[in-house]
Image: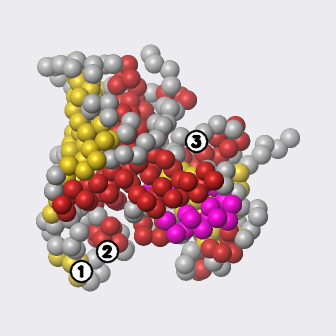
Amino acid sequence: MTPRKIRVAIVGCGNIADRYAERILTYPTCELVGFSDLDPARARNFAAKFGGRAYESLAALLADPAIELVVNLTIHFAHYEVVKQCLLAGKHVHTEKPLALRYVDAKELVDLAAAHGLRLGSAPITYMGEAQQTAWQLLRQGKAGRVRLVYADINHGRIEAWHPNPEPFYEVGIQWDVGVYPLTLLTTMFGPVRRVTATGKVVHPHRATKEGRKFTITTPDFVLAMLEFEEGLTARLSANFYVQGGKQRGGLEFSGDAGSVYLGDFQGFNTTVEFAPLGGAFTAVPLLRPAFEGVEFARAVDDMTQAMLAGRPQRASGSQAAHVVEILEAIGTSMRQGGGVAVASDFTPPPPMDWAERLK
């Protein structure tokens, strides 16, 4: 008997869609059946490259009863409306980050999915990576003792150096585009945040695209936030759209009573993991298994389709994504108004990956 596959369609054929489509084609629980984009020619190009049907519009895609799961890869500002339309059409959804740009909208989507018995998941899912799962296992083993402080530092460079359409990234802000990664990683490992205090500024307002078109940014391209977690952890998040490279890059350092765990990058699955006993030197820790090179962005689609067929919850949940949106919103509020801002929402953290579940 041929194994059952979940029929998947991609909405938004932009910069990251190739990497999603390439990986989805390799998953035994997925059948990639089509594409939609505001520019129908893009959808046709993707269908020609990867197979499946090119839909002339989102409405046409959602009207197809064959599609079970929609992968939403549209721009930040479209996420809420596209996800809502998909859920109202009876489709399960995995969306790129963030789930929405306001907590009230993210909560609405979570409630809508629950009311219709649909699955809703969201990027980022880099906590599913080999290096990230290795670091998490060390922390669960208690190697560092009680973890009380985390530094998460991101030098993400200048979007205009590589992206053909950089302005929307600057408009939404560094915390929404990149800070969301370590926030999701930390809430996976340590649970909900309860208070945020933040500041930020525009450090490099005048920019130019690769073609030389000039533009000016007004949303802070540098953000510094202190996060207070319910379980007692305090984290510092520093992120910018200015430093190109730099020694800090995208690492996280978890410091506890007995030592520290260092994760070399918030994103790459094949980054370094190191451990240092209290007062000692850092040494490399082997990863739990050979790592995917780079970021397997569609890994959550694989997990969701497996979960759908097995009747279990998927790891990337809408409720966690909504909690992260509330944190991001609190960062913005604190930057504008000053002082600490409470975070009230809750979620159930996902379990480790099956291959990382067992503690050595």
* Image x and y of residue 275, in percent: 27, 24
Q: Earlier in the sequence, mark 1 or mark 3?
A: 1
Q: Which residue is mark 1?
A: 215
* Image x and y of residue 178, in percent: 32, 55
**Residue neighbourhood size for the residue with mark 3, other residues' Cα within 10 Å, grouped as few (<14), some (14–19), many (≥20):** many
**What residue lies at 74% left-to-right and 68% top-to-bottom?**
64
Q: CA distance from mark 1 to mark 2?
A: 8 Å
Q: Earlier in the sequence, mark 1 or mark 2?
A: 2
Identity, as a three-letter code, of the amino acid under mark 1: Phe
> Magenta residues?
80-99
* Label 3 SS: loop
What is the number of the mark on residue 314? 3
Above or below, 194 relative to 82: above
Q: CA distance from mark 3 to mark 2?
A: 33 Å
**What residue lies at 45% left-to-right and 50% top-to-bottom?**
321
Residue 241 makes an appearance in the image: yes
* Label 2 SS: helix
Foreground residue among 68 and 133: 68
What is the number of the mark on residue 167? 2
* In this rendering, position of residue 298 left or right of residue 271: right
* In this rendering, position of residue 229 left or right of residue 128: left
Foreground residue among 348 and 206: 348
Q: CA distance from mark 1 to mark 3?
A: 41 Å
